[in-house]
Amino acid sequence: MKKKFTFCSLNPQMRLLGLLTLFLVCTNAFSQTICRPVSQTNSTGGGLLCIGVDVNSPANAFDSAGLSTYATLSNGVAVAGCFAEETMTLNQTARAGDQVAIYFGTGNGLLDLTLLSNATVQAKNSGANVGSSVALNSPLLNLNLLSGNTVAVAKFPITGDTNQIQIQVGGGLVALLATLRVYDVRLEFAQPTVSGGLTQTVCAGVPTTLTATPAVGTTLAWYSSEFSTTALAVGNTYTTPALTANTTYYIGITRAAGCEGNVRVPVVLNVSNPIIPAVSNVGTTVCSTGATQQTTLSVVNAAPGTTYNWYSSATGGPALASGTTYSPTVPLGTTQFFVEAAIGSCVSSRTSVSVTSTAIPATPTILTQSVTIQSGQNATLSATGDVGTQLNWYETATGGTAVATNTSTFTTPILTATKTYYVEAQSANGNCVSATRVPVTVTVQPAALGGCLEASSQVTSQVGICLLCSATNLSNSVDGNPGTAKQV
């Protein structure tokens, strides 16, 4: 028979996931065939004082109307010893490990569980008791209140072969409960063991095979939703397509052909898609003081729960290190590394990282060690460096902007005061410079006071024979100072 329920019911699988929050399913989508009773007998008893004791609409306890109809077991005036009971015959024999879900209420608003001690459930096999009866408020029944706390579901465990369930109200020395409504009775079969658990992590873009081991005598089917009527696969395994988003599949359980257990087992697949690592440029250019130099590489988009593995090849090979940073020692030249992100067994593609190591150029040699000029003149400075390096000239010992680049000579602007310039060597690839800049000072002397109309040099000569001829203080005649003189 097809069942369509229009009530809010607790999803019992949430307990399997360790969640304490009630998950209520309010839907009309329950369309798979659920295993339940197919017939019933009922009776009342307890003596002449048992007025109003009866069983009303007993078939409603397992019809197709869900919580919209119910069977009523009335204890009349609730006299001790009076009882009303209904025995329902299942459509098959339940086995140890199965359970029967009983949806019930009292019709008096909020359920008072303390009144349920004289409402009991008894398993039977062709009329013979299987185990002992259990009160509806017993902890053994794993009872849960549903929406509004007016209806509850009790899961009655089956301990041996059972084909009948008997529900009784009253019969004890103290009659607490006068009326019990039985809305629905359904079979739930022993659940399978799912390899990897009910919550698993799978890799994005990779098909995954789910495997479950059914309880003895049961068969399994896999579904895309809790209420789907079309199975994705029948059997103990199901291979998913390549997933890109978290997905839940459901396992339906059957003992006898033609109907399914009350609940499907959800298997939650969390899809892991590690983000491809991005690596900082810092550390990819190295200036080496020797044949090798250490550097540090860093992942800049590190994510919690992700492991980063470093390799020397694009595929395969043992990991060189793990972590968000890696500090290799590299030789001169270019060395390539690769890093991947991993979450469990799921890995991203590897990111290539090239490290270029360049020798630090030797300090340049100044060719113009001493330069002296007159004020208003400029000077040409010269230096030399290692082959393959370029020379850059600065006005400061560190920092600043070069006043000339890639030249071994530098002509200063016109100077009126002594000034120091600096030269450094830079590698051909531009990555590294010499450890220090070499200074060269241009000494500027004051210009002559007479200016351009006065003599600035002199030559003394003697012609013929001249007794007592001489010249002293020769430079005083061209020093621009009228207060000094040459004597002849």
Image (cartoon, helix red, strand yellow):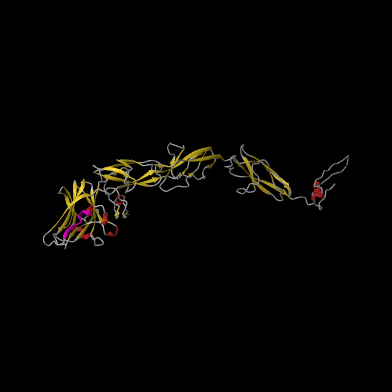
Q: Nearer the viewer, residue 433 or 244?
A: 244
* Residue 478 horizontal side relative to residue 189, left or right: right
Q: Residue at x 54, y 42 (%)?
A: 285
Residue sitting farthest toward the left: 48
Query: Percent from the top left, x then y, of residue 341?
Result: 43, 43
Query: Percent from the top left, x then y, of residue 6?
Result: 30, 55
Residue 7: quarter of image: bottom left
Query: Percent from the top left, x then y, of residue 55?
Result: 18, 57
Whether residue 251 is visible here, answered yes or no, is yes
Residue 363: quarter of image: top right
* Residue 393 horizontal side relative to residue 190, left or right: right
Q: Which residues are magenta?
A: 53-60
Q: Is residue 74 above or below residue 476?
A: below
Residue sitting farthest toward the bottom: 77
Q: Nearer the viewer, residue 292 or 176?
A: 176
Q: Is residue 306 above or below residue 138?
A: above
